[in-house]
Amino acid sequence: MQKEFIDFIQQHSFETGITGASFTIQCPTYHNGKEITYNAGHQSKNGKPVTNKSLYQIGSLSKSFLVVVVLQLEEEGLLNLEDKVAQFFPHDFKKWQDISIKKLLNMTSKIPSFTDGNDSDVILELIADPILNYSSQDILNLVKDKELNNLNWEYSNTNYVLAGKIIEKVTGNKLSTEIQSRILIPLHLKSTYYIKSIPKIDIMFHDLENLMSGYFYELEGSEKKFNGLDIINLSMSRLKAAGSLISNSSDINFFIRTLFESKNFLSRKQQKKLITMIDQATGDELKSTSIPENSLAYGLGIEAKHHPKFKTLVYGHTGGTFGFQSAMWYIPDKKLSYYFALNTSHEEAYNKLELLVEEYIVQRFF
C-alpha cells in the first residue's frame, strides 16, 4: 500500500494540488489488532514528509464530536432531543422556533445551509481579512430570515452551528471547552483541536511542525483564479460547530472506534439514538439494521450506507474544508475502522484516493 500511496501523490499532484495524504486502518484480524497508518508525500509543497502526527482539517467529521456532547447532555438531563429552539432562544430565530434539536442533528430541520454559494467569494473575503472572526451569531444571521426549504431531508451546516449555540446556552461554556472536557481529555486525543480562527494560534506549540497546508481548488463555474491557494493561514471561524476540528489519523481512528465499541463513552440508549437513521431521499425514519441497499441514510452526525464494494453496512462521515478532504468509517461486521485524508479540495483527488483505499480493503477483508 505504501508504494501505491506514493504513486498516487506523484501522479496527481500537478492537476489536483495534493502534496500529502494519510490512511489509517484497524481490525482485530489484521496487524495483531493494532492500527496501521500509511503516509505519503509532504505536508506542503516545500514541507517536511507526512507522518503519523501530521494534522489535517477534518471538516464535517467534527459534527460527530458535537453530537456526542449533545447526547451526553441529554443523558445528564440538561436537554432533550425533542426540545425546540424556542426553549433556548425565544426572542431570536423566529422562523426556527418549532424546530427540535433532533431535527437539527439529523438534517430534517429545513433550515438553509449558510455554506450554499460561491466558495471563491468566501475565499476572497478571507484573503481580505485572514484573521476574520465570525461568531456563531454572525453565521446564523446570514440565513435566519430566509424561508425554510420544502425538502424532507437536506444537509445544512447551519443546523450544527445552531446546535453548538444551544450547547453553549445550556452549559454556560464555549463549545470548544465542552468538546475538550467530554471527548478530547477522556479519550486522550492529544492531537485534536477545536480551531477558533487561525490554526497556528489554536494548536499546541509542539504540534506546529505537524500542521498540514491545504490547497483550494474551485471545480465549478468559471472562477478559478484562486486554484492552488494554500489556505493554512486563513481563519476557520466560519466553520464553527459544523467543521472546526483539526486532528491526526490516529486520533480520528480511535474516536470512531470508541463511538461504536465503547460501553462507557455513550450509553447503549444514546448509541441507539446516534444511529437512528433518516432516508436522505424521502426523509423517512429507518431502522439502522434495515437500510435499503440503494439508500443513503443520516442519523445524528453519522452517515450510513450499504457499501457497494464491501456489501455490508458502514457508518461514518465525510468532511471537507477549502483545502482538505477526509472520511472516517466503521464496519460493524468486521469491527474494522478506517480513516483517510488529503490536503486538497479537488474532488477528483478525493475520489481516486477513496477508490485506492477501498480496493485495499476489499483485497484483504472481503
Image: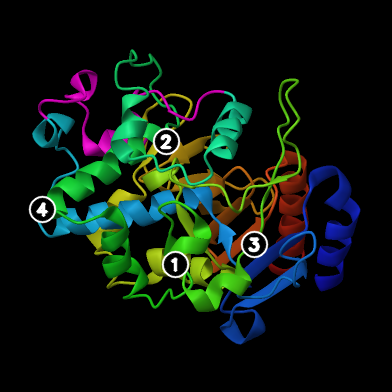
Q: Secondary structure at mark 1?
A: helix
**Residue 78: numbered disc:** 4
Residue 105 lies in the magenta-colored region:
yes
Residue range of the region highlighted in magenta in the rendering:
90-117
Overall secondary structure of the magenta stretch? loop
Q: Which residue is mark 1?
A: 255
Q: Secondary structure at mark 4?
A: loop
- Image-based side of 268 in relation to 317, left or right: left
What is the CA distance from the residue labelled 3 to the residue labelled 2? 24 Å
Q: Quadrant of the C terminus?
A: bottom right
What percent of the width, then of the height, locates residue 188? 39, 78
Nearest-to-viewer mark from 3 and 4: 3
Q: Nearer the viewer, residue 29 or 210?
A: 210
What percent of the width, then of the height, locates residue 145? 30, 16
Label 2: few (<14), some or many (≥20) within 10 Å? many
Q: Amino acid at mark 3?
A: Met
Nearest-to-viewer mark from 2 and 4: 2
Label 3: few (<14), some or many (≥20) within 10 Å? many
- Image-based side of 34 in relation to 215, left or right: left
Q: Which residue is mark 2?
A: 157
Upstream in sequence: badge 3 or badge 1: 3
Is residue 237 depicted above or below 364 in this figure?
above
Nearest-to-viewer mark from 3 and 1: 3
What percent of the width, then of the height, locates residue 84? 15, 32
What is the CA distance from the residue labelled 3 to the residue labelled 4? 38 Å
Where residue 107 sits, quadrant-wise, is top left
Q: Which residue is mark 3?
A: 212
Q: Amino acid at mark 4?
A: Leu
What is the CA distance from the residue labelled 1 to the residue labelled 2? 21 Å
* Residue at (36% x, 70% y) in the render: 184
